[in-house]
Image (cartoon, coloured by chain):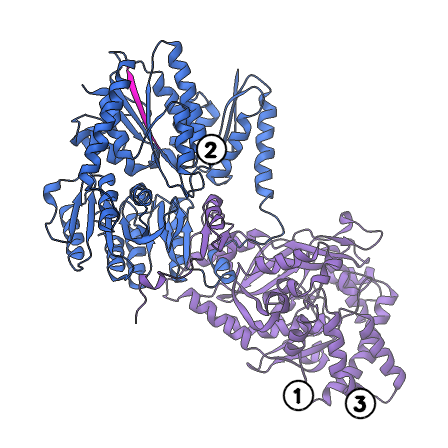
Amino acid sequence: MSPKINDLFGKPIKVVNVGLASMAQPMRDQNIPVVDVEWQPPKEGIIRLHVTKSGVDIDAANAEVCKRIKAARPVLVGMGKAIDVIPGYHDHLILHAGPPITWERMCGPQKAAVMGALVYEGLAKDETEAEKLAASGKIEFAPCHHYHTVGPMAGIVSPSMPVFIIENKTYGNKAFCTQNEGLGKVLRFGGLGPEVYTRLKWMETVLYPTLNKALQSMPDGIDIKALIAQALHMGDDCHNRNRAATSLFLRAIGPALARTNKDNEVLAKVIEFIDKNDHFFLNLSMPAGKAALEPAEGVEGSTILTVMARNGTDFGIRMAGMPNTWFTAPAGMVQGLYFPGFSEADANPDIGDSTVTETAGYGGFAMAAAPAIVKFVGGVPSDATACTMEMYEITFDEHDGFSIPSLNFRGTPLGIDVRKVMETGILPKINTGISHKNPGVGGIGAGILRAPEKCFRDAFDAFRKIC
Amino acid sequence: MTVKTVIKTSEYHDSVTLMLVAKELTKLPGVQDAAVVMGTDSNKAILDQSGLLTADAKKATPNDLVIAVKTDGDVDAALAEADALLAKKQSSDNGAEFRPKTVRGAVKGMNDANVAIISIAGRYAADEAWECLKRGLHVLLFSDNVSVEDEVALKKYAREHGLLLMGPGAGTAILNGVALAFANVIPAGPVGIVSAAGTGLQETSTLLGKKGVGITQGIGTGGRDLKKEIGGIMFLEGIKALQDDPDTKVILLVSKPPAPEMAKMVYDQVLKSKKPTVVCLLGGDPKSVVVAPQIYPVNTLEEAGLLAAKLAGAQIADPKTVIAKETAEIKEIAKTLKPKLKKTQKYLRGLFSGGTLCYESQAIWRDENELEVLSNAPLDKHYQIADSNKSEKHTTIDLGEEEFTVGRPHPMIDNDLRIRRLLLEAKDPEVAVIMFDVVIGYGAHPDPAAELGDAVRKARELVAKEGREIIFVSSVTGTEGDPQGLTRTTQTLKSAGVIVCNSNAAASRLTALMVTE
């Protein structure tokens, strides 16, 4: 039977109020449940987009994109050196976080990380020489995102760096990411010095082979999606809090590590290194997101983001429906908490590919699952919940693989829809680490900011032209 | 005395927030007048009248916020205070409790929501109405300024999906006993109402309530529904729903007179059921009514309410007898009032917040008293007033018309505009009587009688100084169960010297007697 007006008669009235708050008060006075929408007019020039000129239903396209992201099953299948395993890599290629950028426009920490990588590779004997080489035009720079790769903070990948290989078992595509060095004076935050190189070398010569050997003994690999799902129930958001996920990872790889390693002292050092670095899992969580998002690229007529990344100078996004076009805006400043001795005056603008986690439906968007994160990025626990609730407004879907216990196991907000961002004026909220603006210093804190409006406005305008 | 304005470009606040800020400003020492409004043409006209329209304010666009202050105190301090108040209003929304920013977000938080009330600016309202309908919500679309094309498309979709799309411009509905927007507390009972006139629904339902008769549903369709271009989609769907509803024993229909083919559609639908149906086509030609046993034609809202009450079993006399008795009583009252007026006081002025009440009064004045009353919302073009802001001869103004409400609250929420106008009319030495409606209930001002009563006192003092008296006549659309209370509201008005009648029709008749022989 088709629905009738009469179906409403006799039922309890429950009201959504859009507009004057004075319309909601009488509902409360009559003890009628009412949700009061905090409505704001759309920004000038923003209209509702439904269908493209070529006849594609945008909602259907976006549903397809979200379906693909949800269906992804990213698994850690092994490791290798960048030059050996990343398709198209060559010995003078350096990858960086964020949208494309020239050496001249790179921010301090990203330049420093490039210099450090060139020294680490033996292509330059010191940082001064490295700087000359980087500026000489002999080195090719490209975004990680152009090579199925993601990098936290400066996101520098050089040829001999070991990378994790994540395979999306549903679609067969692969994504890559280096190993996480820890916090403070580390290359990805633009930290330079002997201790940085020593650590990187140890990671290449001890950590990597040990982990890789263990992984080779695990025919099914390690299901990273499952670890993320569990960690979200243990207080992580898998962007700025990876404490539970890192522990879960150690549990998952522990027996294989023990079985495949002959030297107990090496084993102890490896476990110690992972244990001392709460962010170790970040470099698995990020490529898992990348592996999940890539199969959605190219779905015609979709306004969902498949890339959101920063290089410390620019903030850039790409939509599934226009997978090769970057929309950029100047990167913003982070509001946050600083390590002792540092302040906002020292901070570099927003940087890193780690926003791949928010793009894939966790990270800051799942902050409600990680109330303790506010000790790291500032604020009070209710802010974490409010952040997730707000992000539901600009996402197209909810994840069926990731859920938030405190929200009655509601799925995490998934699929940032450029239309909804512009209609509501709500910009994606990002939680992130903070680099010192000067080369060589490293990480100095963490905090929260919003994505810049301009790139969303530009993406919307470009999309509108095909509608 | 200094007048100063500040223009804030592209700053949006809802009209009620602005009203509250303006009210706070007028309480500051030295402030004579203040306005915080969006820069629409109608608001600028109002600023002009109040002497607040500076050169800056003239240039404001409808997207700009205009803050105007007239003071003999510190004008900059007052403007700074306005800033602070606006900021406070904004931040009070930023509490820890999360409020969704979209309909989608709201429905996710309350997935069994079934009714949406939309009161945002008209140009955005259709988009949000679509969002609501697509999510299966019945919609009360309070917003005006929605295009005919949008209204038709929305209503067709609603009809196909068994949903109500009440409006645009629908200010009143009562669904399952719940008062939505501007509506009153009416007991449950056997009468079902469909109204294409918001205050028509309020007046008839409260008249029923006053006789102890309740209603099943009160469905408002918006005033344009029975126009040819909309085709009466919701009016007809509303009738069908009530005809199919086993709890509804008597149906009451209220509208301004529709075009003949529209009227035919309504009657055709009415004839499909045997349920007695009271048809009130306000100001229409009684001869055009289709004669059938279940059709009960009436001319006024008052008669409609009384007849529906009687058909529903209320122990009252025949409505015509009730009205005749009441009219006789009014004549007695008129006899005592008339001597207070001078010969030069010849004209009536009506100041309405309810459009249908304004319309009912005009119908009575034309049909019963043969008075020519000009209006901004006339019965026909012949009585169109040239300038809504300037009364001439007999004039009645509907202050709820769009020209007064773009970017400012409705006169049922905010008495300010009506008070200004009331004082202005009182200064006219040719005015004999000022009639105004007082609509209470949910959605309305928390105590309109207090503010309007004060205005009447002030006006009476004013004219007393000039050696005149003016008669103030009113009626209260409301029930005892309303938050403001019928008795309390009536008493407050009476204590200010207002003659309060039992219905808008009765008040109209008394008003006419003040200016006729």
Amino acid type at mark 2: Val
Q: Is residue A43 visible?
A: no
Q: Residues within 10 Å of mark 2 (few under 14, many from 20)?
A: many
Which quadrant, please, contains the N terminus of chain A? bottom left
Q: Which chain is blue?
A: B
Disc sitting over residue A220 in the figure:
1
**Chain A's shade in the image?**
purple
Residue range highlighted in magenta: B430-437
Amino acid type at mark 1: Asp
Q: Are marks 1 and 3 on the same chain?
A: yes
Q: CA distance from mark 1 to mark 2?
A: 66 Å
Looking at the image, which residue is at 31% across and 48% down? B213
The answer for which chain carries disc 2 is: B
The answer for which chain carries disc 1 is: A
Along the line of sight, which residue is nearer the eye, B116 or B493? B493
Q: Secondary structure at mark 3?
A: helix
Amino acid type at mark 3: Thr
Question: Horizontal and vertical percent for residue B194?
Answer: 27, 50
**Picture quarter containing residue A167?**
bottom right
B361 shown above or below B433: below
Disc sitting over residue A260 in the figure:
3
Q: Which residue is mark 2?
A: B37
